Image (cartoon, rainbow, N blue to C red):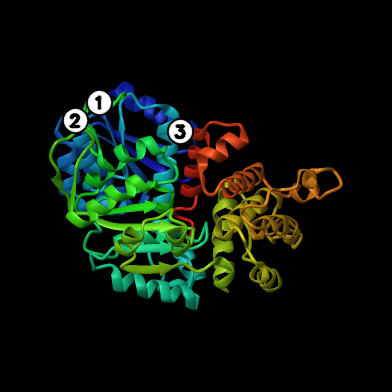
Amino acid sequence: MANHKILIIEDIASLSMAYAGHLESAGFESIIVDNLADANSQLQENGTQFSAVLLDLQLPDGNGLDWLAQNPDIVQDIPIIVATADGSINRAIDAMRLGAYDFMVKPLAPGRLVTVTKGAAETKREAKPTAAQHSNENTNNDALGGFIGASQPMQSIYNQIRNVAKSKATIFITGESGTGKEVCADAIHKSGPRAKKPFVAINCGAIPEDLLESELFGHLKGSFTGAISDRVGAVQAAHGGTLFLDEICEMELKLQVKLLRFLQTGTVQRVGATKAENVDVRIICATNRTPSVEVQHGRFREDLYYRLAVVPIHLPALRERGNDITLLANRFLDRFANEEGKSFSPLNVQLAQKFEQHSWPGNVRELQNLMRRAAVMFAGPELDETIVSEFTAASPQVQSINLQDQNTEIPSNQFSANQGIDQFDNMTLDQVERLLVDRAVQNCGGSLTKAAKKLGVSPSTLYRKKEKWASSLAADC
């Protein structure tokens, strides 16, 4: 994380020094101030140098929430991470509504502090390309949000985003896994009048079924075992802004009924509550399945589908995006080379042509993993053309499994010494694990619970893995 500078606004010296120590151990540079006046001075003088701000809410010369409200330009330009001893959910929601990147309750766990700060720094870097990047990607001027690409399919997507951004219509985004559905939802949000309001994302496939209703609609203290305090759900947290429901086809049918009622009435009723509350939220949802097939097989309510799919947007697969593949490859290579302390030249013409001829069954995620390996394996500055063997060796195995009937088991001898196990030699452990998990979920009709039983792990393990894989691409498309 070299060259990332973090501004820490904290009036308790022992805490600010501890935060700085954790961050500096992770490669960040920290600047500490203990009041808002000094913070303003630092931001006026060096604002463009900061990758993120860690903000305490109770400060000697003012309240952090008031400061956020009075400085919308700072919030827009720099990710703000709020840290406070006050764990009130209302303060968390207020901070998010004012544009905070994330909210943490003291004491801050060092691991979470570093993880959140890394995410904020990446958000700042992707949102503000350098002059060199602008020069190298001058064909990408019309791109929106976190998207990279100027191909005709993507120009069509950009036009759709601009056309629907100012509307309140619900959006249903479809596309293969890894095509950038959350990036699309975020671009719609940021291009419209709700841009300064919350964007709340919920992965319906990453939350256990018995908890999803509470996550969406909230609950009252004592409404069920484990409900130790009142909780505002994602719908209310997104009030005034946008709620993004990813993997919507994973939602169980009885909860689909409650979502439909919310869409029809504009009100939510928390678990255990006796009355409903009004909410103003725009809904964007997404799936990597085919919604009409899910409706046909009775796994998704037809009335809910038509209520959600007012404006459908289908994202193209990476293999359909032509020269965008080279743009993305160069961006990833530049990023990962920087992390490795190396420097690489852009792909040469011959290598770019081979990249653009590859089918990329894993879409942007596959390309991202390949370029990460390239940055680690090769010294630079030229990328050795043997990198081609990396994807030509890995992709046939991925494609063969993806193209099989979902109800067909993988033969037990497929992984024997003489039956192609060497095809996994150039895949990362994460790729192999994802391949097996996705296959198990397919064989179990999309049920993560059944897949977990088949794989011999707990459902929560698969939910965490799916959530990690889904979020890893958020700013990479």
Comparing 93 with 342, the one in front is 93
Does the image show residue 280?
Answer: yes
Q: Residue at the spot x=36%, y=52% of the render?
A: 245
Residue 287 screen position, x and y as percent = 44, 57
Q: How many marks?
A: 3
Indicate the quadrant where residue 319 lies: bottom right
Asked if the residue at tag 2 contacts the one at tag 1, i.e. Cβ–Cβ closer than 8 Å, the answer is: yes
Tell me the residue at 23%/52% (across/down).
Answer: 261
Q: In percent of the image, x 22 and y 59: which residue is there?
A: 194
324 vs 113: above or below? below
Between 75 and 40, the residue placed more toward the observer is 75
**For mark 3, what is the residue?**
24
Relative side of 420 to 212, left or right: right
Q: Compared to 265, does 208 lie above or below?
A: above
x then y, percent, for residue 440? 61, 45
Image position of 314 (left or right of 379)? left
Residue at the disc numbered 1: 85
Q: Earlier in the sequence, mark 3 or mark 2?
A: 3
Q: Nearer the viewer, mark 3 or mark 2?
A: 2
Q: Which residue is mark 2?
A: 58
At numbered mark 3, what does the secondary structure look like: helix, strand or loop? helix
Between the C-alphas of marks 3 and 2, the distance is 24 Å
Question: Going by the picture, which residue comes out furthest to the right?
Answer: 418
Give the x, y percent position of residue 420: 81, 50
Q: Residue at x 52, y 69 (%)?
A: 136
| Residue 393 in the image, given as x and y percentages of width and height | 75, 57
Comes first in the chain, label 1 or label 2: 2
- The amino acid type found where label 2 is placed reads Gln
Q: Earlier in the sequence, mark 1 or mark 3?
A: 3
Label 1: few (<14), some (14–19) or many (≥20) C-alpha neighbours in 10 Å: few
Marks 1/2: CA–CA distance: 9 Å
